[in-house]
Image (cartoon, helix red, strand yellow):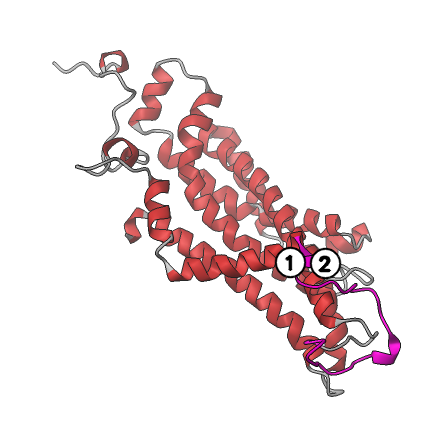
Amino acid sequence: MTDNHPESRPAGGPVQKADEPGAAALTGGGSGPSRSLWSDAWHDLRRNPVFLLASAIVLTMISMVLFPTLWTSADPRACDLSRAREKPSAEHPFGFSNLGCDYYAQVVHGAGPSIQIAVFATIGVAVLGTLFGILSGYYGGWTDALVSRFIDVVAGLPFLLGAVVILALLRSRSIWAVVLVIVALSWITLARVIRSSVLTTKNLDYVAAARSLGASDRRIIFRHILPNALAPGLVILTIALGLYVAAEATLTFLGVGLRAPTVSWGVMIVQGQSHVLSGYPHLLLVPVSFLVLTVLGFIMLGDALRDALDPKLR
């Protein structure tokens, strides 16, 4: 009669089936050196032209945020009304704004607030979504019911309507106010994905073995369950980064986001849209183009990660 107790298993940890998460790291898929899911993903990504193109776009935009002086030495707030709405030239490729500010310098420095909001909002969503997803999926019972109902309540509030109402109540137009609203209304998608991943993982054999050996809930969650949820969560967060850049511009356009003198793509779009019919469409098209390119870069990056991290798509 076969002994199924964890103590009787061979040294080296719990035995996993080949089709279980993490088994690739142990078996290596057969002959040859073993590779983890992340090693296989990187092996595919570095040969994926979509990933390389998206990475180039994202790194370019991030460099504008971290090192704007690499792109321009002009001050985006140094304005000269005598040059207002001056057309593009070789020296000033995007011309001048309606206030006489160098538009190229404003585009470079405008990446800062837009991408900062997206990054901080993504961090907040990652923390909240992961926390609620693990609590709901791992403990189940009344905890799962309570968290699930709370998620349903938040999901019932449309993002734009909820953001407009909350920002109007806060009466704040700062970066942190916009971040707070995005986090408060956007964590539910990640929470549902994490919950689903936890429900799939927590009853697998190697988790049961760790539990029978006396591992604490914290150790099981961080050593066995959470790593299996990282892949789908990372894909969602990467795509969300681009969507949050667009969310900042949308909220600013609706009048509840950032305001001048803050220089952001959203503020530039608001200021430029009133001059399209006056013969200066570049004041709108330039920030819109950079916004669309950034959003597209993050979405392409997320799609490439999804294809590389999902074994079913290999």
Quadrant where the image shows the N terminus: top left
Q: Is residue 251 above or below residue 9?
A: below
Q: Tag 1, which secondary structure?
A: helix
- Asked if 4 appears above or below 94 in the picture, the reply is above
Tag 2 or tag 1, which sits nearer the N-term? 1
Among all residues in the image, which is located at the extreme left? Answer: 1
Give the answer, above or below, for where 242 lies relative to 119. below
Disc 2 marks a residue whose amino acid type is Val
Residue shown at the point (82%, 79%) measured from the top left: 84
Residue 220 located left or right of residue 261: left
**Is residue 251 visible in the rendered structure shown here?**
no
Majority secondary structure of the magenta segment?
A: loop
Q: Name the front one of labels 1 and 2.
A: 1
Q: Is residue 229 left or right of residue 185?
A: left
Residue lying at the far right of the rendered structure: 81
Relative image position of residue 274 (x, y in whole percent) = 76, 79
Q: How many marks?
A: 2
Q: Looking at this view, is 160 or 283 the one in front?
A: 283
The residue at 34%/15% (across/down) is 212
Kind of residue at disc 1: Met
The stretch drawn in magenta includes residue 173: no
Image quadrant assignment for residue 13: top left
User: From the viewer's perspective, is 180 left or right of 50?
Assistant: right
Q: Secondary structure at mark 2?
A: helix
Q: Quadrant of residue 226?
A: top left
Q: Which residue is mark 1?
A: 64
> Looking at this view, is 31 or 208 the one in front?
31
Left/right placement of residue 242 relative to residue 313 reads right
Q: Which mark is residue 164?
A: 2
Question: Picture coordinates of residue 292 (x, y %)?
Answer: 57, 68
Q: Which residues are magenta?
A: 67-94
